Image: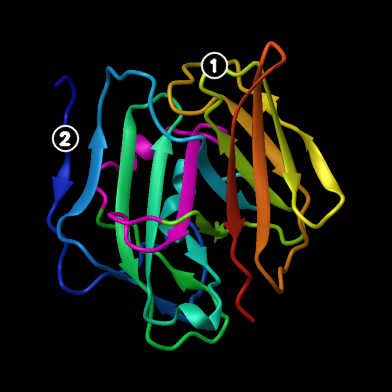
Amino acid sequence: MKGLWLTRVCTAMLGVLAAGGSATYAADATLKASPFWESVQRDVDVSGIVVVGLTTGTLLSGSDLTQLSIRPPRSLAGSEVCLTVQSRDGVYLARNTYILPAQIGGDAINLPYDQSGALDLLRQYDQMHLGISVVEGACQEPTQRFLKPYGPNTAEGSGVNLMVNGFGATDVFYSVSGQNMSGSCDPLRNGRTTVFDFWCHIGLAATQDSPVKIVVERERYGRALPPASFTVAADGH
């Protein structure tokens, strides 16, 4: 197998690296596994799932990963979530399970990323070049229930962003169940698009009081490909 696998042993206490920012969090989620899991591969084949990333507000770059947070609903207190970070070119992939605090009050919960051994590499990835997702459940048994990750400069009220692997699709569309909201996604043509090649911006409300179902449909020269559907969890209050 070509490529370089990087692993770092995490310590029992997880610190928060707040480079260049002053973000404050109600608590830290606890990284479940040791060591922190990630890989860097210079030569890769096209692979992945349809919905590669979901973030809210401002698109995130690699520099934002050390100040990543979620606002989970209280029902997820003590539960596990899976954070996945993938570069569009396929070079970087990290997938790690975090355990949320036993008590959640609707405030921001930090997902520490300081155990990564590839932060210098990640800082080279600008917006549109990373797929970041947080889903309910451990990474070994992920669900299709997404939580919205926030960066240090996330602007509320600016919807969600999807990073989509078209798997050869020429057109990609989205629709929000129960809401009069649908549209098309924009192709990403510049640079290597091994992991995802479409971007969709969906104008959801800044705060979701209940889960929202989103359907992603793909076409190849007018021929429908299998759709992908998932749920965006309600926001914590």
Picture residue at 32% right of the left edge, 61% below the top: 138
Dot 2 falls on a residue whose secondary structure is loop
Residue 2 located left or right of residue 120: left
Q: Position of residue 5 (x, y in %)?
A: 16, 35
What is the CA distance from the residue labelled 2 to the residue labelled 1?
A: 28 Å
The residue pinned by badge 2 equals 5
Kind of residue at badge 1 = Gly
Image spot of residue 167 (x, y percent): 51, 22
- Is 96 or 9 nearer to us in this picture? 96
Q: Is residue 14 left or right of residue 172?
A: left
Q: Would you identify the image quadrant in which residue 110 lies? A: bottom left
Tell me the SS state at disc 1: loop
Q: Name the residue under label 1.
A: 168
Task: Please check the rendered image and state whether residue 9 is part of the magenta-colored stretch, yes or no.
Answer: no
* Residue 195, horizontal then vertical, whole percent: 44, 27
Q: Could you say where residue 165 lies in the image, as x and y percent from the top left?
A: 52, 29
- Is any part of residue 57 visible from this angle? no
For the magenta stretch, what is the residue range?
116-142
Q: Is residue 90 above or below residue 18?
A: above
Tag 2: amino acid = Trp
Residue 150, above or below 214: below
Q: Do the residues labelled 2 and 1 touch (CB within 8 Å)?
A: no
150 or 82, which lies in front? 82
Instruction: Name the quarter where the N terminus is drawn.
Output: top left
Nearest the eye: 204 or 175: 175
> How many discs appear?
2
